[in-house]
Amino acid sequence: MAWNSGQIAVAVIAVYLLVLIGVGVVSNRVFRGTAADYFVASRGIGPFVLLMSVFGTTMTSFAIIGSSAEAFKGGIGVYGKMVSWSGIFHSVCFFLVGVRLWSLGKRYGYQTQIQFFRDRFESDKLGLILFPALVGLVIPYLLMGVIGAASAIEAITAKAFVDQAWAGKNGGIPFWMGGAVVCTVTIVYVFMGGVRGAAWANTLQTVVFIVLGVVTFAVIANRLGGPVKATQQVAHYNPAHLKLGADTADDKVYEERMAEFEAGTSPIKPKHPVQIPPLVFMTYMFIPFSVAMFPHLFQHWLTAKSAKSFKLMLVAHPLLMMLTWLPCVLIGIWATSAIMPGGGASVIPPDFANANAVLPMMVNKLAPTAIGGLLVAGVLAAIMSSLDSQLLCVGSIFTNDIVNHYFSKDTLSDRTVVVLGRTFVVAMAIVTYLLSLWIPGTHVFRLGVWCFTGFASLAPLVFAALYWKRATKAGAYASILTAAVVGLFLFYRAYQETGLARGEEYLVWGMMPVTVSLAASTLALVVVSLLSKPPRPQTVDRFFEARC
Amino acid sequence: MKKVVWGLIVLLVVLHQDFWLWHRYEPLLFGFIPVGLAWHAGISVSAAVVGWLAARYCWPNDVDVDDNASPGGQASGPFDH
């Protein structure tokens, strides 16, 4: 009996998840049983695995599904907003922040961001306000991962279990089961191998989603008559999607194509030309600074074997981003004007509203069935490579910064710290899973965009900690509190004005909100630092004069 | 060289505002990549080149740490004990 597309997808997912468990088992065999090994892989990760684990951690399902969705809705602008800005500033953050933090982390034994900030800003209590800020920003991010993975599994396995009462939408694996499986597999390899397990799994997953993206692109381009023809179709029906700015000529083309569609002489319903305001395009530049404060990235940085391990990342990270995003953006643009091979109907139905389903639909209609199954493996790879690192870092923060530091005064044994770390990883995964069943998915995705704004608003803290001797404890508190107050205020205003609806970008004076919250937290840091007592000379020596 | 690298980063930020390409899509790179998208892909490649220059010529000489200098797993700062 021949398998249908859903059943093939189930088989691909099962094999893929078993391979990940295998990675966990292998990494467990080299686990040394110490906290340093569990949380920072004994600082022994080389350049290639460091690159792949950091890249996999920073890429989410948005890189594959979201990029094509945004290109389908608004054209090529998503690449400039998300990828080329990140290409410049992610590398800047890796160079200016990552390398220095690794160096200080190795010298003084830090395992979490909070340990570093407590020490640098001479404040034992700083962790008490950083902890809720960091964990509060990571949790929606975690939820996005679980909800994204469970939704993708349910959609792509449609028809696999049509006769079963427990099946989800269209006979696919139900949301609750998909989420439970993804969380369980992630727990297994993070529990067994700690950050080394996550780094190895991320390396595998990064290779998987890059290769599958390129393969999917080649197959779809071929089915559309080649990339040149696919783009020519867009130039004919939706030329504004090939540009950043629409003009009156695009409006005219839109009206002509719409008249043809309404007269029944064309299968493609054109999309209304959209233009990105230049100020919005420019102020997207502040979003990539969020990587400077991602706690899960901090943890990966600390795993590096040497400072030189970062060099490959500086060069390859922008290229890998391009390799991942460019094919998906092109597929999203082509989807606006694609006609089924042989003529006839459009590939994407007119008035198709669910942009996140554009890529799966292009694959389902244009590619062989097996590619659909492999696509879900690619999406899961992108999601799980972030999920594992985030679970591990939250577990690490709970263990090291709260329980061990505040409750046990750093007296816990190494073995107890590892047991606690594992326990918190499992507990956090369970809490995230239960929240994913309870919170409406769409709201979380909208919330996720604000997480980047929050992390970017905290970035002045880490730059000042590393490069400004005069930055003080009071300045640090002021910066964190200002970022929280301004960020929450803007979030509240956005919620009131747009309901956080997708497609409706909430702007402040025509700019991305991150511009205001970042400026406010920087100002608070500078002004309050200058007005308060400078750090002690020994602290300045420890972090500046006596640099390793 | 450090100033050159910083200058190149500023140049990339300026070049990112490609307002001169906003209202056209031709020429198409390889016949299918619109010029605006090709431009930003070029920014990604240029960022990699600047990253290489930074790693090659501006690498800080005070960041490598001897394995013996590390206290191991536990943090050793005055506020961690």
Image (cartoon, rainbow, N blue to C red):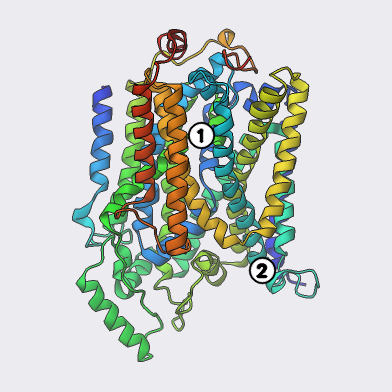
Residue A261: % across, % down = 36, 86
Residue A2: % across, % down = 73, 71
Task: Determine the residue positioned at 35% across, 45% down.
Answer: A516
Task: Determine the residue positioned at 48% across, 35% down.
Answer: A293
Most foreground residue, A382 or A340? A382
Secondary structure state at the residue bearing disc 1: helix
Q: Are marks 1 and 2 in contact (CB under 8 Å)?
A: no
| Mark number, residue A156 | none
Q: Quadrant of residue A193?
A: top right
Subunit ID for the residue under disc 2? A
Q: Quadrant of the N terminus of chain A?
A: bottom right
Q: A421 above or below B62?
A: below
Q: Quickly name the residue at label 2.
A: A5
Q: Badge 1 local density, few (<14 within 10 Å), some, or many (20+)?
A: many
Left or right: A452 with respect to A188?
left
Secondary structure state at the residue bearing disc 2: helix
Task: Determine the residue positioned at 64% across, 21% down.
Answer: A42
Q: Badge 2 local density, few (<14 within 10 Å), some, or many (20+)?
A: many
Residue A411 in view (yes/no): yes
Q: Quadrant of residue A441?
A: bottom right
User: Of the residues shown, which amino acid type is indicated by label 2?
Assistant: Ser
Q: Quadrant of residue A316?
A: top left
Residue A276: % across, % down = 30, 60
Most foreground residue, A498 or A301? A498
What distance separates the C-alpha of mark 1 from that of mark 2?
A: 34 Å
Subunit ID for the residue under disc 1? A
Q: A387 above or below A408?
A: below
User: Of the residues shown, which amino acid type is indicated by label 1?
Assistant: Leu
Residue A315 in view (yes/no): no
Q: Quickly name the residue at label 1.
A: A51
Most foreground residue, A450 or A382? A450
